[in-house]
Image (cartoon, rainbow, N blue to C red):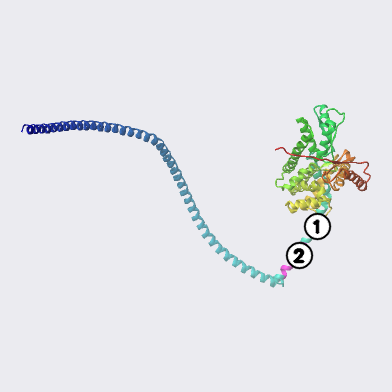
């Protein structure tokens, strides 16, 4: 019993202990929960305060940002409103103006309606008067026919015959008076017109020669131009086709060639070589190509400037190029471009004196010798060739007619054609403007070159030393050394046959072999 009692007590104590422990744990747990709730409440309160603070800060920042963005928008809105107010004011003013115009138009419309009514009334009155007048005229005609014993048609025919006879007599007397006056005053008037044109015209006579003088900085440059064993001067003459004359005259060398364009390219090439200082065959060829291109540009600019100076602004491109090439052509020793400009100006001045188309006279005068820029390609008749070129380039029929009738004494020629012919005669007849020997000399040198070029294998030929030498460049792939000797003999024989007393002409055939490779 004691053991059971002890066990029961132990069980009771254990239960009491467990209960006490449970109560204690429950209290501790409740205290912790209360503490946690207090902490959570405190944290929630702090978070709410922080959120409120952030909210207030965000609201303030948003308000500041809104104010900052609102200010330019308000200014823009104010500007737009101001512009709208100004536009409204303008529209109101325009509306008022339109109202006033409408009032004026309505007033004019009422006036026009009233005027139309008055005109209709007057037209009716006039129609009645015309009908009455027609009746009176018919009555008078019938009365006149009865009194005269002839019909109205017979009376009209008799009156016309009488007036026609009177008019013929008057016209005959007037024509006779005009012819007498023209015969008496024509020569004096023509002399006066030509004298006035020449008096108001001042133009230098441009006469070309076959030699260009080039000044050099020192005589030491002559040696550099000649080069070692003369290789530079030979290369220069071979490339340009122009002979360099180097003598003892200090400070100068001369370039000799009958072709002015070829001589100008050579002069430009040598000038640039002297300024650059590097003179050797490769450099000569390079500078020559650049100079040739520059002279071609100068040719185009010369044609455009000549047309512009004469007030002609619509010439076709081929005609401008041909005008530029006339700068390097001569006729009887006279520069053809300067001659054409002179003819154009003189013809225009005389046309103004006679009150005819001065623009047509200047245009036809400028183009009257245009084909001489290609005289060896187009043909021998310069007037017809010039007219054909002008027609091909779209010139007017009036200009073509003047050019076609140039140097032809046709009675049907226009006044402008006669003026161009007179201007051409004045230009050719001026002292120093007419030198036939130079023209014949150039023609002879060209014929020498053409004879040499006709042979097989010849690439180019240049007449030098006033026609005493012709240098012939041949294709080394076609002409060998043996055929070169035969070719020189054939050219010399043909020159003897085709030229009248050519004198002694040295034929020099040059066969050059070049090997060119490129390093990559």
Q: Residue at x 55, y 61 (%)?
A: 122
Task: Please give the name of the residue rendered at 87% of the width and 30% of the height, measured from the top-left corner.
Answer: 247
Residue occupied by mark 1:
173
Please give the range of residues in magenta: 154-166
Residue on which the image places disc 2: 162
- Foreground residue among 339 and 128: 339
Label 1, residues with CA under 10 Å away: few <14, some 14-19, many ≥20: few
Outermost residue, left side = 1
For the image, the number of numbered tags is 2
Q: Secondary structure at mark 1?
A: helix
Q: Classify residue 309 as left or right of residue 456.
A: left
Residue 24: which quarter of the image?
Answer: top left
Q: Is residue 293 magenta?
A: no
Q: Is residue 94 visible?
A: yes
| SS majority, magenta | helix
| Quadrant of the rendered image containing residue 175 | bottom right
Q: Kindly identify the residue that appears in the image at 67 percent across and 69 percent down.
A: 141
Disc 1 and disc 2 in contact, CB within 8 angstroms: no
Residue 46 at x, y percent in the picture: 26, 31
């Amino acid at each position: 019993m004691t053991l059971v009692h002890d066990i029961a007590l132990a069980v009771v104590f254990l239960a009491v202990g467990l209960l006490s422990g449970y109560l204690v744990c429950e209290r501790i747990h409740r205290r912790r929960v209360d503490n946690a709730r207090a902490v959570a409440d405190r944290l929630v309160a702090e978070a709410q305060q922080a959120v409120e603070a952030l909210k207030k800060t965000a609201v303030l920042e948003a308000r500041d940002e809104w104010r900052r963005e609102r200010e330019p928008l308000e200014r823009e809105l104010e500007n737009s409103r101001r512009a709208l107010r100004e536009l409204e004011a303008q529209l109101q003013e325009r509306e008022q103006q339109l109202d006033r115009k409408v009032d004026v138009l309505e007033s004019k419309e009422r006036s026009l309606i009233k005027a139309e009514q008055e005109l209709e009334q007057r037209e009716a009155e006039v129609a009645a008067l015309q009908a009455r007048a027609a009746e009176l005229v018919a009555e008078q005609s019938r009365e006149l026919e009865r009194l005269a014993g002839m019909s109205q048609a017979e009376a009209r025919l008799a009156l016309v015959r009488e007036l026609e006879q009177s008019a013929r007599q008057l016209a005959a007397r007037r024509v006779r008076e005009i012819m007498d006056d023209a015969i008496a005053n024509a020569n004096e008037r023509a002399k006066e017109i030509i004298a006035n044109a020449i008096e108001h015209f001042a133009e230098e006579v441009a006469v070309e020669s076959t030699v260009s003088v080039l000044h050099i900085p020192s005589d030491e440059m002559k040696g550099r131009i000649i080069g070692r064993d003369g290789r530079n001067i030979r290369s220069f003459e071979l490339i340009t086709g122009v002979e360099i004359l180097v003598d003892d005259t200090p400070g100068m060398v001369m370039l000799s060639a009958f072709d002015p364009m070829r001589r100008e390219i050579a002069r430009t090439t040598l000038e640039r070589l002297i300024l650059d200082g590097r003179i050797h065959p490769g450099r000569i060829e390079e500078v020559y190509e650049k100079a040739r291109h520059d002279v071609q540009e100068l040719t185009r600019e010369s044609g455009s400037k000549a047309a512009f100076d004469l007030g002609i602004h619509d010439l076709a491109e081929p005609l401008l190029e041909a005008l530029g090439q006339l700068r390097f052509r001569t006729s009887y020793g006279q520069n053809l471009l300067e001659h054409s400009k002179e003819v154009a100006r003189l013809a225009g001045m005389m046309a103004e004196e006679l009150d005819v188309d001065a623009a047509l006279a200047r245009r036809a005068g400028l183009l009257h010798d245009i084909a001489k820029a290609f005289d060896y390609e187009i043909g021998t008749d310069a007037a017809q060739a010039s007219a054909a070129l002008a027609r091909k380039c779209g010139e007017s029929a009036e200009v073509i007619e003047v050019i076609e009738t140039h140097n032809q004494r046709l009675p049907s020629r226009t006044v402008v054609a006669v003026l161009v012919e007179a201007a051409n005669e004045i230009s050719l007849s001026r002292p120093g403007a007419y030198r036939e020997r130079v023209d014949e000399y150039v023609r002879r040198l060209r014929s020498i070159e053409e004879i040499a070029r006709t042979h097989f294998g010849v690439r180019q030929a240049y007449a030098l030393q006033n026609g005493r030498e012709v240098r012939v460049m041949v294709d080394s792939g076609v002409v060998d050394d043996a055929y070169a000797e035969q070719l020189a003999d054939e050219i010399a024989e043909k020159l003897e046959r085709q030229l009248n007393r050519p004198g002694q002409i040295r034929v020099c055939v040059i066969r050059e072999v070049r090997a060119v490779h490129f390093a990559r």
